[in-house]
Structures are given as C-alpha cells and as structure tokens.
Image (cartoon, rainbow, N blue to C red):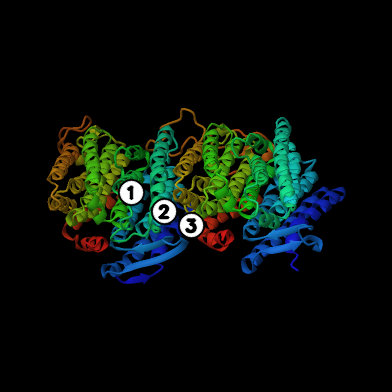
C-alpha cells in the first residue's frame, strides 16, 4: 500500500510535535524541523499527484479501517493538485519568511513554527480527506491555529482582528457542522463517496436541501464570500507577515476546493443545477462579490488592505465560475484555485519583502521602490499583471475559461463583472506601480532640460533602509542605491513568479490532464 | 499554399528579448551596451529578411509554441502582411538605435539602460504581433507592448510624464481589456477558433447587429490605432524621449494597433462578410471623421511633436480607411501606407528630435530661419512631409494613389473627397514649417550674412538622412512590398 497520502498529512503533524520539543533544546532547531517536515510533505504531494495522474484516484484507509467506519483519505486529480499547491506554498513560504519571523516575533518563533505546521496539517487534511466529519475537524484545526497565528501579529490591532475572525469563523464552522448533522441523519454515513451514492435516491428531500444550504453557507463564511467577508481584510492585514503570506493564498482557496468538492462529489452537479434553482442567485451574488471586492480595494490606502480586498474579489470569480453550471465555468474556477493561489502568494511575498525593508506599506511610503527593490518589484508587477489578466500570466487563462463559461451559460452579467474587475484591478495596480516608479517629489517637474545631466529625484538614500536602522528616510539627493530584500526572499519570489508564467503557458496542459479528466 | 514549419519567427521574437539581460549587465559600459543593441538589431533584421524569399514564393512559415485549447494557441505564422510589418519595424529599429545613441547621450538622459531594455522588449513584442497566427497571440503581444512602453513614456519621471503615462495606460489597457478581450472571447465562443484565415472565421454564425457590435469593439478596442475618440493618449505620449515617439509612436506601437484592425477585418471577419453586412462603410465613416478632425487639430498645434502626433492619428486612419474600403486597390493602398507612412513619419520625428538636441527648440514658431542653420535636417523634413502628404517622389504617393483608386473602385466618391481634403490639410500643416525654416526670419537670426551651419551630431543626422532617402527609394521600388501585400491579402 502506498503510504504517501498519510505521510503528506502526518509529516507536518509529527513535525509540529518535534518542533515543539526541540525548542526546549534550541530555538533555531524548531525551524529546521519545520522545514524538513514540509519538505517531506512536498515530496509526498508531488508523488501523489504523479500517481493519481497515471493510475487514477487513490484511496487510503487510515490504520486499515474500512469506510464508512474508518477514516478515508481519498485523493483524486482535483485534490492532488490542491495538495501540491498547499505543500509547495507552505514550504517556500517557510524559506522566505524566516527573517520576517525572526524580526516580528523573535521571542515566540518556535510557537509560530509549531502552529504553522499544525495549520498546514489542517489544510492538507481538509483537502485530502474523504470524510465529511473529518473535514469539519480539520477545518477547525486550520481555523484555531490561524486565530492564534493572526493574534501574534500587529500588537495593537491583530488581537481584535483575530477575535473578530474567531466569532465569525465559529459561526461558519457551526453552520457546516449542522449541515453535516442533517446529512448524517438522512444518510447515516459521513463518507463522501458513500453519502453521494445514498443522496441520489433522496434528492427531493427538504433535509438534504437544508443540509446543502447549511454546508455551503458555512463554507462561504470560511472563504469570505461577500457579504460574509468582513473578517478577512483585517485578519490578513494585521497577521504577522510570515503567516499572512500563507493564509492569504491558501485558506480561501482550500475553502473553494471544499465547495467544489461538495458540489461535484457529494451533492452532485445534477442535484445542484437541476433540482435546486439557486444557480442564478449565486452567480449574481458572485457578481456583487467581484464588484464589491474590486471597488473596495480601490479605496484602500494601504497595500496590505488592498491585497486583502482583491482576495475578496477573486473569491467571487471562483464561486461564480463554479455556479455557472457548465464545464467551462467549473474548469475556470478550478484552474483559478491554482492560479489565484500562485499569484496571491507572489503578491504577499513581495509585500513581505517590502515590509521587511521598509516596515510600512501605506501607499505614500512606497515611492521609489522600483529603484530600491527592482527584483521584488519585478515579481510584484508580474503577479499584479496576472491579477489583471494579462497574458501570458496564468491569471489570463483562468479568466479566459471563466468568461467563456459565462458566455456559454448566457451569464453576460458575470462576464461583464470579470471584465470590469480586470479594469479596476488594472487601475489598482498601476496606481501602486506609479507610486513605486516615481520618486516622492511634490511639485518637482521639468528636470529635463538639455544639459541637465542628473535627475534630482528617483533616488532614495538606501543606506538608511537597512532593517536594523529602523525607519527610512526618503527623498535625499544622492546615488541610487539598491536596498533589496535578502536572497532567500527573492529566490522564493523568483520561483513563484516563474511558476505564474509556467502555469500560464501550460494552462492547456493542466486543463487537459487534471481538470477535464476530473470533471468527467 | 505551402506550409513551412520553422523556428525562425520565434527566434526573431527571442533575440531582442534575450539581449535584455546583457544590456542590463553592461549598464556601466554604454559602448558595449550599444554594441549589443546593434548586434541584436541586425540579427533580428537578418532573421526577418531570411524569411522573405519563402514568403514571396507563396509559402507560410508557421511555428506553434503552446496550445491552450483547439483553435486558441500561442502560435506564429508569417504571411505577406506580417512580413511587411516585421520588415518595417526591424529595419527601423536599427536606424532608431543609432539615433537613440545620439539623442540620449546628447541630452545626457538618465536611466539609459532601462530605456534601451524596455525599447528592446517593445520591439520584441512588435515582432511577435507581426508574426501572430491568431487573435489570441496577437492580443498577448499587444498587451506586452502596451506594458513595455509604459516606462518609456514615463521616462522623465516628472509630473507631466506621470500624467501622460497614466493617460496612456488608461486608454490603451482600458480599451484592450474592456473591449478587445470580451470581443475576442466571444468570437471564440461562437466559432471555436481564433486563427486568421482568408474568408474569415464566421461561417454565417453572426447576425448583422452582433457583427456590428463586435467589429466596433475591435476597431475602438485596438486603441493603439488612435481612432477617435480613443486617440488622446498619443499626443500625451509625446513627452517620451524622441526615439520613442519616432519608432514606437509613429511605427511600432501605433502600427500594431492598425495591424490588429487589419487582421481582424481581413482574417477574422473577412471581406465578404463585411461587404455583405455593408459594415465597411461604418468603419470608413469612423476613420474619415478621425482623418479630417485630427488634421484640423494638427493645424493648430505649435509644439512640433504634438503636430506630428495629430498627423499620425490622421494617417493611421488612412490605413484603416483603406482596408475598410474592401476593394483591392483600397486595401493595397491602406496596407502599404503602413510602410510608406512609417518612413515618412519617422523622418519627421527624427528631425524634431535633432532640432531639439541641437537648439533646444520644440515649438514651430521658434523654428523660423532654422533651416539655413540645419539644412540637412530640414531637407529631410521636407522629404518626410512629402511622404506624409503623399506627393512624388516619395513612397507616400503610391499609397495615396491606390487609396484614391480604391474609392473609385468601390464607388465611394464621397470618401475620395475626404482623402483630397485631408491631403490639402497635410500640406498646410507641414509645408509652411519648411518654408519658414528656409526663408523665414527668426528673431535672433541675422538678417544678412552667411549663417553658420550647426547640425546635430552625426548619430542624429545620419539616421534621418537614411530614412528620408529610403522614403524616396520606396517611390521607385515598391514592388516587393506590393507583392507581399498581394500575397498576404489574396488580392
């Protein structure tokens, strides 16, 4: 029996245990254990994906107990892809964030790593499990660790944001649990595949309808679908950056995965689109979510908040695509889980680099960043273009499928929302690019006269930008000196930027080998 | 038609792209950096030129890079039309690179490495657009080109360039995402393909209203073509250093816009469909409006580069106009104007830049009497003007001739008047400049006595002389380009 699925989930769990212990010996040790655990997870995830592509769905029975009694990990093409995404992002982020963590929470770094690993256990577990109740437990593990991790952030504002997140998160989890309760009462089973078979016989039942609505509502709260999103922007903006970088790309995406799983595997597309008549309403909701997210992002004055609202907007893409009721839309939604994970990760990596070097992310503090941090900004620009949807970045290709799906479903309002949000995102990002490209020179103009060799601005005295020196001083004339983030951070960003392009040019391959076979 | 599979189109796109890291790494050694630019320019040009014989013999050179979905892949296909455009852009890139050295060093500009790097990126995207086999690929390079040009427009990093760069993006990116993207996906939704083909891709699948809306989305959406009311980014973009205005905003960027419209009209809709729905006339009305109005605006501009910009807007619409005529001569005249206008207008911009570097003057009212001081520059300016007006002995005559012939062929005599009126306007806004330069009296100019000749540096004068002479050369030897167009459009 191939034990890779179990290793995938258990490696970070055991890692968390040992990382906690190791901190007694030496604090730094817990980091290396975390790194090793996640590396193992990555390898396992990739090997599982390779296996699933070649030999089909994998069923792993924990400790050999047969379902529906035992816990089953059930990995098909969809969650194999999401598992690779999770474990790679979690690993890369750990490499990139070690310096951020050391600076932001120096005294509690080991606890950070322990909780971080448990968070990854939760995410991979949620994705790998084939059991509805297990899913609940694992969602709670993810949530509880994220409450704690968020509270480690900004001293003044993070605790309140975390508390807010707890309240809403608990409500979401309760909804989901209640839904699972209804399902258990009607079907007598908790195993997804099992439930799916039983449900085909009782589709008209009100209990099933209630179960479905409760589950979906719970998941929507957890994924921050507008208007259930209010917890997200503050929670992500005030979390320690080492955690924000991983929770922002992964948490909501995993919840979208759960939604897709419930729709495709548990309740079935037929039930959702032929028995229920909710699709139109949900697509409208998605349209509102997209527009609300995009336009709220437009009014932010802090990069962190802006990115957080973009997540709210992107959630609308995926929910809308999944609810269009055709293969193209669902393909777009699933592809966007991958793509949005990558581009959000890249954006937050860049954000973390900026925070590391400048400590501030308010727009007015970002000027001259292209000169000071060209590599970070290159990654940021690429990810931004992907959010806007400029080919050949991956964001274009998921948008392609989503818009095609919208045309096929006749949902022109959804297509329009996607286009409008692309335009708004273009405005958003170019506003930031412009601030970063130009130097802070209020009233400065017309330096360009023949014979004037040096531009008086475009310059930062980057010497003061070293992290140890604290606050930066801007606007002095002098030579342009680069003040880039450490190599580990840049390497991570470079890798993710490359994968944004790769996911773009190989979008066709991903769709053909993973998404379409899964949907058939 | 014979299909040849070759990696050459891809290489053409890659050469300027791959030279960028080299440029960046040699930023401390300007001479080395410039040598690399020329090396890349020549390699690119020879790659393009090496494909000419095959294309002239009626073959199509194709190369598929990535497949997204059937009918929508990232692929290159070199036909006559793309070859014409690639030849124009790649040859002028070399000339502009020489000019650029003189200009940027003459003004001791900052950020020269960034400048040449994004310039190389822009030319790479232009090549990609020229060789695109389908609308998706074309859109890809169109967008890359928009983004590559942004730092060039914002080059001076002052308040004016900030506003201009912003306007540039709002118009170019706004229209391409807002109009072209949905229109393109809709085309794919209806037909399942985006590949350019001669009869078009719609086989009776479009109603007239749908076709009209789609066509307008494309015509206005490719805002690089400067069709009114989406033109005002072009005068604003004149804040960029003159090499950018010369190559990008007279040749590469704007012509990519026009080229895209030509592709959509001939390769996506097809001449027959447009004729059937009588949509050519709709486009011609839009183009005519732009031709006349922007010519009138050009008359009132005192800043030389802005006058040239409005002239460009007007001339770009000639091309759209010609293709929308849907008659063989009209299409030939329109498309060959891509070439003829390129050489004429780049000469004019080169002159404007040379005048600025040599004297610091950028307003026409300051240029009285300047011709005696800079005779070569103003002689070239005169030739460039003739090219744009469409008078012999310049290539511009050939395109005007065919355009007018095209209106007669199509029986659109009213539109012939538009062309004639516009030619008069062109003459009115160009020739007085030349006259005043040679025979006018500037304030500071001495009324008598010999004037000392003070041309700009050779790096600036040689390129403008080359393009001016080429403009004349094209009057005598247009045949190869005509053949390319005839093959490309199946005329």
Chain ID at mark 2? B
> Going by the image, does B474 lie left or right of A149?
left
Judge whether B457 appears above or below A7 on screen.
above
The chain under label 3 reads B
x 76%, y 54%: residue: A12
Q: Quadrant of residue A461?
A: top right
Residue B182 in the image: above or below residue A232: below
Q: CA distance from mark 1 to mark 2?
A: 23 Å
User: Which is more N-terminal, label 3 or label 2?
Assistant: 3
Give the mark nearest the N terminus, 1 or 3. 3
| Of residues A139 and B405, the one drawn nearer to the viewer in this rendering | A139
Mark 1 or mark 2: name the one nearer the start of the chain. 2
Question: Residue, x 49% and y 28% (percent of image)?
Answer: A442
Find the residue positioned furthest to the top. A443
Query: Do the residues under discs 1 and 3 have CB atoms within 8 angstroms?
Result: no
Pinpoint residue B378: horizontal percent, then vertical percent: 21, 44
Q: Position of residue B271 (x, y in %)?
A: 25, 55
Say which residue label 2 marks.
Answer: B189
Q: Is residue B2 left or right of residue A365?
A: left
Decide if residue B108 is in sight here.
no
Q: Residues within 10 Å of mark 1 (few under 14, many from 20)?
A: many
Tally of numbered discs: 3
Q: CA distance from mark 1 to mark 3?
A: 30 Å
Q: Position of residue A355 (x, y in %)?
A: 64, 39
Residue on which disc 1 sits: B257
Tell which subunit mark 1 falls on.
B
- Crowd class of label 2 (few under 14; some 14 to 19; many from 20; radius 10 Å): some
Residue A494 at x, y percent in the picture = 59, 53
Mark 1 or mark 3, whichever is nearer to me? 1
Q: Quadrant of residue A247?
A: top right
Foreground mark, 1 or 2? 2
The residue identified by callout 3 is: B22
């Amino acid at each position: 029996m191939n034990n890779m699925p179990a290793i995938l989930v258990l490696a970070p769990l055991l890692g968390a245990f040992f990382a906690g212990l190791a901190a007694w010996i030496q604090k730094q040790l817990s980091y290396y254990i975390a790194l090793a655990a996640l590396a193992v997870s990555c390898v396992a995830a990739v090997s599982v994906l390779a296996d699933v592509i070649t030999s089909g769905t994998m069923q792993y029975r924990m400790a050999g107990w047969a379902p529906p009694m035992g816990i089953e990990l059930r990995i098909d093409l969809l969650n194999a892809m999401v598992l690779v995404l999770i474990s790679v992002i979690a690993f890369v982020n750990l490499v990139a964030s070690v310096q951020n963590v050391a600076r932001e929470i120096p005294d509690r770094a080991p606890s950070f790593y322990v909780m971080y690993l448990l968070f990854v256990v939760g995410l991979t577990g949620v994705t790998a499990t084939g059991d509805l109740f297990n899913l609940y437990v694992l969602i709670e593990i993810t949530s509880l660790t994220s409450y704690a991790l968020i509270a480690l952030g900004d001293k003044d504002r993070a605790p309140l944001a975390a508390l807010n997140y707890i309240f809403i998160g608990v409500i979401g989890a309760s909804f989901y649990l209640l839904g699972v309760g209804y399902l258990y009462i009607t079907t007598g089973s908790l195993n997804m595949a099992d439930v799916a078979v039983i449900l085909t016989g009782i589709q008209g039942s009100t209990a099933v309808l209630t179960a479905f609505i409760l589950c979906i509502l719970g998941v929507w709260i957890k994924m921050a679908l507008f208007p259930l999103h209010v917890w997200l922007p503050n929670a992500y903006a005030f979390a320690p950056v080492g955690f924000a970088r991983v929770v922002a790309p992964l948490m909501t995406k995993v919840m979208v995965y759960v939604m897709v799983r419930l729709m495709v595997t548990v309740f079935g597309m037929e039930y959702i689109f032929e028995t229920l008549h909710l699709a139109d309403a949900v697509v409208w909701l998605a349209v509102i979510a997209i527009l609300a997210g995009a336009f709220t992002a437009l009014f932010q004055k802090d990069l962190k908040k802006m990115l957080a609202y973009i997540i709210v907007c992107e959630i609308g893409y995926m929910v809308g695509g999944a609810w269009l009721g055709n293969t193209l839309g669902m393909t777009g939604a699933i592809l966007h889980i991958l793509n949005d994970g990558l581009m959000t990760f890249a954006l937050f990596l860049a954000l973390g680099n900026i925070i590391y070097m400048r400590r501030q992310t308010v727009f007015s503090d970002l000027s001259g960043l292209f000169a000071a941090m060209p590599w970070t900004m290159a990654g940021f620009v690429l990810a931004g273009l992907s959010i806007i949807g400029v080919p050949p970045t991956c964001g274009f290709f998921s948008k392609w499928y989503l818009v095609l799906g919208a045309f096929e479903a006749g949902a022109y309002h959804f297509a329009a929302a996607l286009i409008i949000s692309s335009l708004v995102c273009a405005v958003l990002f170019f506003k930031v690019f412009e601030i970063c490209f130009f130097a802070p020179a209020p009233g400065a103009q017309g330096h360009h006269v023949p014979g004037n060799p040096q531009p008086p601005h475009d310059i930062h005295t980057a010497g003061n930008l070293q992290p140890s020196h604290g606050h930066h001083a801007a606007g002095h004339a002098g030579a342009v000196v680069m003040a880039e983030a450490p190599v580990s951070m840049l390497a991570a960003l470079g890798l993710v930027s490359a994968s944004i392009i790769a996911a773009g040019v190989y979008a066709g391959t991903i769709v053909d080998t993973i998404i379409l076979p899964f949907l058939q | 038609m014979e299909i040849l599979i070759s990696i050459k189109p891809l290489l053409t796109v890659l050469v300027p792209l791959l030279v960028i890291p080299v440029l960046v790494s040699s930023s401390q050694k300007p001479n080395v950096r410039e040598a690399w630019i020329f090396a890349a320019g020549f390699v690119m040009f020879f790659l393009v030129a090496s494909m000419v014989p095959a294309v002239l013999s009626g073959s199509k050179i194709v190369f598929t890079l990535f497949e997204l979905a059937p009918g929508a892949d990232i692929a290159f296909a070199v036909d006559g039309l793309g070859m014409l455009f690639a030849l124009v852009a790649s040859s002028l890139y070399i000339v502009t690179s020489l000019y650029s050295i003189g200009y940027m060093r003459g003004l001791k500009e900052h950020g020269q490495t960034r400048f040449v790097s994004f310039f190389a990126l822009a030319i790479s995207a232009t090549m990609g657009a020229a060789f695109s086999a389908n609308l998706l690929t074309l859109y890809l390079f169109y967008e890359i080109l928009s983004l590559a040009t942004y730092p060039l427009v914002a080059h001076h990093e002052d308040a004016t360039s900030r506003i201009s760069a912003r306007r540039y993006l709002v118009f170019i990116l706004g229209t391409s995402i807002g109009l072209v993207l949905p229109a393109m996906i809709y085309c794919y939704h209806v037909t399942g393909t985006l590949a350019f083909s001669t009869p078009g891709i719609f086989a009776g699948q479009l109603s007239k209203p749908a076709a009209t809306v789609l066509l307008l989305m494309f015509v206005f959406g490719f805002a690089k073509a400067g069709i009114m009311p989406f033109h005002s980014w072009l005068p604003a973009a004149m804040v960029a250093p003159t090499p950018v205005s010369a190559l990008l905003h007279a040749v590469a960027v704007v012509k990519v816009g026009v080229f895209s419209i030509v592709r959509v009209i001939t390769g996506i809709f097809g001449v027959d469909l447009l004729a059937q729905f009588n949509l050519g006339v709709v486009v011609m009305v839009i183009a005519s409006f732009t031709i006349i109005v922007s010519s009138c605006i050009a008359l009132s501009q005192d800043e030389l580069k802005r006058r040239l910009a409005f002239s460009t807007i007007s001339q770009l619409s000639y091309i759209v106009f010609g293709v929308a005529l849907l008659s063989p001569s009209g299409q030939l005249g329109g498309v060959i104007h891509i070439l003829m206008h390129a050489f004429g207008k780049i000469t004019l911009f080169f002159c404007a830049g040379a005048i600025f570097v040599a004297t610091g003057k950028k307003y026409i009212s300051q240029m009285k009497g300047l011709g005696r001081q800079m005779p070569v520059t103003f002689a070239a300016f005169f030739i460039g003007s003739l090219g744009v007006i469409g008078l012999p002995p310049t290539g511009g005559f050939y395109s005007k001739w065919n355009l007018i012939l095209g209106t007669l062929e199509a029986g659109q005599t009213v539109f012939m008047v538009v062309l004639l009126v516009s030619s008069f306007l062109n003459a009115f806004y160009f020739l007085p400049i030349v006259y005043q330069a040679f025979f006018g009296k500037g304030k500071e100019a001495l009324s008598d006595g010999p004037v000392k000749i003070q041309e700009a540096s050779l790096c600036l004068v040689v390129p403008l002389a080359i393009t001016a002479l080429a403009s004349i050369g094209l009057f005598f030897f247009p045949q190869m380009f005509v053949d390319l167009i005839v093959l490309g459009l199946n005329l």
